[in-house]
Image (cartoon, grey):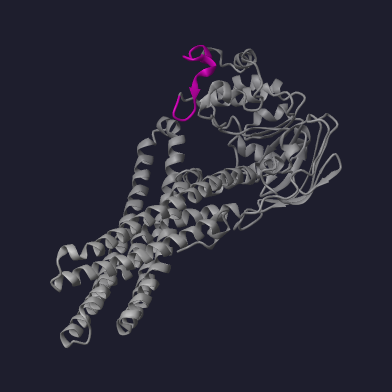
Amino acid sequence: MLDKRLFKFPGARQALGVLSLLTLIQAIAIIGQGRFLSVAITDLWGGHQLTSIGMVLVWFMLAYLLRQVMGVAKQYALAPFADKTTASLQTQLTQKYAALGPRTVANQGTGKSVTLAVEGIDQVHDYLTLVLVKLFDMSITPWLILLYIATINFKQAVFLFVIYPVIVIFMIVLGLAAQAKADREYETFNRLSNHFVDSLRGLTTLKQLGLAKQYAQNIYDVSEDHRKATMSTLKIAILSTFALDFFTTLSIAVVALFLGLGLMDGATHLLPALTILVLAPEYFLPIRNFANDYHATLNGKNALADIMTLLEQPVAPETNRYVRQSQRWQATDTLTLEQVSFSYPNADRPALQQINLTLTGHAKVALVGTSGSGKSTLLNLLGGFLVGDGDVKINEQALPHLQQRQWQEQIQVLPQHPYIFHDTLRANLAFYAPDQRDEDLIAVLQQVGLADWFASLPDGLDTLIGEGAMQTSGGQAQRIGLARIMLDEERRVLLLDEPTAHLDIETEALLKETMLPVFDNRLVIFATHRLHWLRQMDWIIVMRDGQIAEQGTLADLIANNGYFVTLQAAMRGTTHA
């Protein structure tokens, strides 16, 4: 139940030390509360006046008050640790996502990534504040009560000691069943998150294609799976709570039975018997509270495990090995890959195999190939988002990989779907160049063909766009992505992953006129399925099954009459690649 990695968090040992002390004081208060209550009842039963037991009642009230104060103090003692730990985890998680690159988010799903960084952190906070208190209660309080009962009636203490492991074993059996159910529910919840986010982001396209109702049914089916998994887990939780209450109540009844028989036989006196009977429920209370909160903390435990697993993933070493005087990529610079390979985890075959490639100066390089041929993987590797095996050199400087800070500071990326942040239009445009003047931002909007759209905005550059605000069409998003690139003259390496794949021909033709001048004086690596772009490329790399099948100029590839010609025919729809 308790993740051992908790003890590695800063401040964990101090917080747990304070928690131990407070729990110890609370346990003594519980024993005192039970003892003074028993004395008061015994005295009243013996015919004493109420005024004669005034001090006993005062001590009872003080013990009761101390118990409640310690319960509140434990929550306050843990709150700073839980707040600091979860805040640190959220920061580390965000930094880890940035260090590992977009591939990690793509692998586990956007929905799960967002859920883990937001709701998962809240669940971890609940887990920390609940499980530690209950665990220390169960580790300290019952055993102090048991020691005190042993000083009163050793046989009753032995019985309570023997019955305790039976209840624990029963808890473990039901707990494992609940854990398995909760794990399946957690997976279903992550699947629902990914489905929901992906469907929400593609809602406009789905409506245009007439598939909105079909995907609505899909979301409904996934949510029903989640509901059924949740109810199934709750059934086990309710069953285990009932069974635990039954066993503890039965155990207390057995204790009461033997104490009653002892009173009838004269083998025991009323005060010790009543003290044991009052303390017996307190003896079982920590394990009952722990069992009740066990199910409430499973999601937090799973979320913490996922976060810690992600944080423990290794990042590429030596990310500052590449050093250059000028940030700009020069016409004489070269980038060389020799025998570079890359494999995704649990993949049947490598995504890239023995890539040999040299990129020089301000060349315009096209990556072509069928879906799954390795174009996007090669782009991610060139951008330093993935780390493969093999030799990498920039200007003959050997590097372990391209996840180098100064190399990535030279790169701009234009994907199929440029991300529009929930922020002002100004902040979205100035992503690569935050110091640009408003006049420059407006000028570049005119260059990319967004002048009319900008004129219609209610607050100009201060207009909020993105999710939860004013939405942009696919063409507008592409133009905003292009404007980001045009505003930064320092970054001279441009990676484009089929940026026009989902645009209509007319919009693409208009966007192409704006994009081509941007390619000048830059190293451009352009992954595309559109044949008309190839005429503007200086070099074409043909990918097939993770390997470079051919490379050369367009004229050379056509003259070779090899795989590229077959691929070209397939892209035109006249044959299969």
Q: Relative to 520, say whether 190 is above or below.
A: below
| Any part of residue 188 in sight | no
Q: How many marks?
A: 0
Please state the horizontal and vertical placement of residue 168, each as a whole percent of the image. Answer: 37, 73
Q: Quadrant of the C terminus?
A: top right
The residue under the point 77% across, 25% down is 521
Observer-nearest of 307 and 139: 139
Please state the horizontal and vertical placement of residue 27, each as a whole percent of the image. Answer: 38, 65
Observer-nearest of 512 and 458: 458
**Which residue, as the protein is rendered here, is positioned at the far front?**
52
- In magenta stretch: residue 464: yes
Please state the horizontal and vertical placement of residue 452, each as a whole percent of the image. Answer: 52, 12
Observer-nearest of 468 and 48: 48
Q: Relative to 176, say whether 160 is above or below.
A: below
Q: Relative to 47, say whether 483 is above or below.
A: above
- In magenta stretch: residue 351: no
The residue under the point 69% across, 40% down is 383
**Which residue, as the protein is rendered here, is positioned at the far left?**
47
| Any part of residue 308 in sight | yes
Magenta stretch: give its range. 453-469
Left/right of residue 317 with respect to residue 483 in the rendered view: right
Left/right of residue 340 with respect to residue 36 in the rendered view: right
Q: Quadrant of the N terminus?
A: bottom left
Please state the horizontal and vertical placement of residue 210, each as a whole percent of the image. Answer: 39, 33
Observer-nearest of 557 and 37: 37
Left/right of residue 289 with respect to residue 350 in the rendered view: left
Q: Relative to 551, say whether 440 is above or below.
A: above
